[in-house]
Image: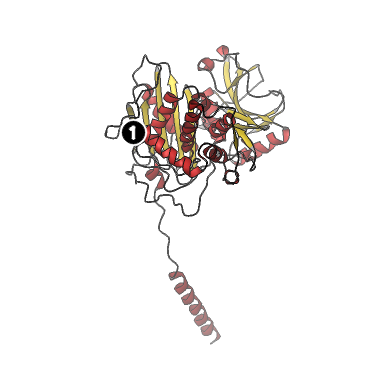
Amino acid sequence: MVGSTRIRQLLSIFAILFIALAAIPIAAPAPAEARERFAAVTVDAHTGTILFSRNADARRYPASLTKIMTLYVLFEELKAGRLTLQSKFTVSRHAASMQPSKIGLPAGATISVENAIKALVTKSANDIAVVVAEGVSGTESAFARRMTQTARRIGMTRSQFRNASGLPNSQQVTTARDMATLGLRVQRDFPQFYHYFSLRSFTFRGRTYRTHNRLLGRYEGTNGIKTGYTRASGYNLTASVVRGRRHLVGVVMGGRSGRSRNAYMRTMLTRQFGRAPQSSSDTVARMAGTPPGFRQVAEIRDSYPLPLDKPGTENADAPVVMAGVVATPPAIEPAPAAPAQPEIAPNPESTAVPESTPAPEIIIPQPVAANAGNPFNAPAAEPPQHDPNSWAIQIGAFSSENDAIRRLDVAQDLGLSALNGRSPFTVAHFVEERVVYRARFGGFDREGAENACKLLVRKAINCFALAPNGQ
């Protein structure tokens, strides 16, 4: 009897639990966001010809690519003489309250126009974007209206802006084609200011901020311009690359990680450099407001794999999710599905080579000159970025310098704060008539180097600390 009573009690409990669970709604599976937000385009900067496109006219979130337009408007003010590089902007409470990425100036502080430009192109500082907007137009909303008007005037036919930073707003949209137009126009219209987009670091009030554009100094000929990221947009990049008489502008939007986005951009541009016609002109295509390839053309597809690796973090524009903003709002047009393909990855770890007896070394700073693949021709004009009096860490040794650089990229794409502001560099190490390239980061003290190695080892990257002047 006792057993039967116990069984009835258990059955009653299970019935209650079943009814309760049945009342809970089951969430629908998440959509394949990477395919819906991916877009890419390559443009010949001399002619405005579209060389490659995929979803180029589908609306996408710009994220911090927005700041290119913010700077375009600021450059207009400088060119008109209404501001100078020494003019001062004051930080408002609204600007100081912005979410990261930011410089962190308090309300009431001031910053010069030139330092504001540098903060936007390197740190991608959201607070400084608002400072610029308020300094030019009085309010950020008024500045955003001017951004949209400017976009229409220069040929960005499908873009609209609601803020100066690129922080999430479901009505702030653009296209890969429009971003290519902007990348071309900022070079054509403001050659006297465009050089700021090639900055790799910016020192302000005792702190040094490194650019988030990892192509600078690591992909031959890159001269700018900007990365972007929010959770809704994915990883975005507009890049400008000049090689000899060839000049290409590429845009990749909606990458699943900084690493795969950068790899896609490199592959896309490298293949097109082999096809792009040479030009005797050194000027950017003069489109007079007409977007590149404005005529409706069929998508130009190639075998480039979509960047669909696992989501990662990048120390660029910090992931931000704001209330009421969803990943795929009605304003965003769904892109045609494309088959997922493997990400372009660095060479396998098997390319790493063992080290032996220490030998003389040549430090090759990043960026590496075109002839630096041969260490005997390494240029001596540019000093190493790494201070030999500081500690360093080593994360691998490779038979190819490109493999060493890729390993540095992989480490940086982990988004570890321990690597913020550290100098990546390679060292050519000669062993029995062959060269080994060591991948290192510099600029640490002893504790910082040891902590960085602990974090990297947890991420399955071999690492050890090196004392100042260590081999």
Q: 442 or 233: which is nearer to us?
A: 233
User: Is residue 400 visible in the rendered structure shown here?
Assistant: no
- Between 207 and 355, the residue placed more toward the observer is 207
In this view, the residue farthest toward the front is: 82
Coloring scheme used: secondary structure
Please identify the quarter of the rendering in which residue 458 is found.
Answer: top right
Residue 37 is situated, as x and y percent measured from the top left of the image, at: 39, 43
Whether residue 118 sits left or right of residue 263 in the image: it is: right
Looking at the image, which residue sits at the far bottom? 1
The answer to which quarter of the image holds residue 123 is top right
| Residue at (71% x, 27% y) in the render | 390
Above/below status of 136 relative to 382: below
Residue 103 appears left or right of 139: right
Residue lying at 48% horizontally and 40% vertically, measured from the top left: 143
On the image, the x and y values in percent for residue 329 come to 40, 51
Q: Residue 360 appears in which quarter of the rendering?
A: top right
Q: Where residue 385 appears, x then y in whole percent?
A: 63, 23
Q: Position of residue 223 (x, y in %)?
A: 48, 24
Q: Can residue 80 be seen in this view?
A: yes
Count of numbered circles in the view: 1
**Helix, strand or loop status at disc 1:** strand
Residue at point 46% right, 35% down? 69
In the image, is residue 316 above or below residue 114? Answer: below
Q: For mark 1, what is the residue?
A: 53
Q: Residues within 10 Å of mark 1 (few under 14, many from 20)?
A: many
Q: Is residue 33 above or below residue 348?
A: below
Kind of residue at badge 1: Ser
- The quarter of the rendered structure image containing the C terminus is top right
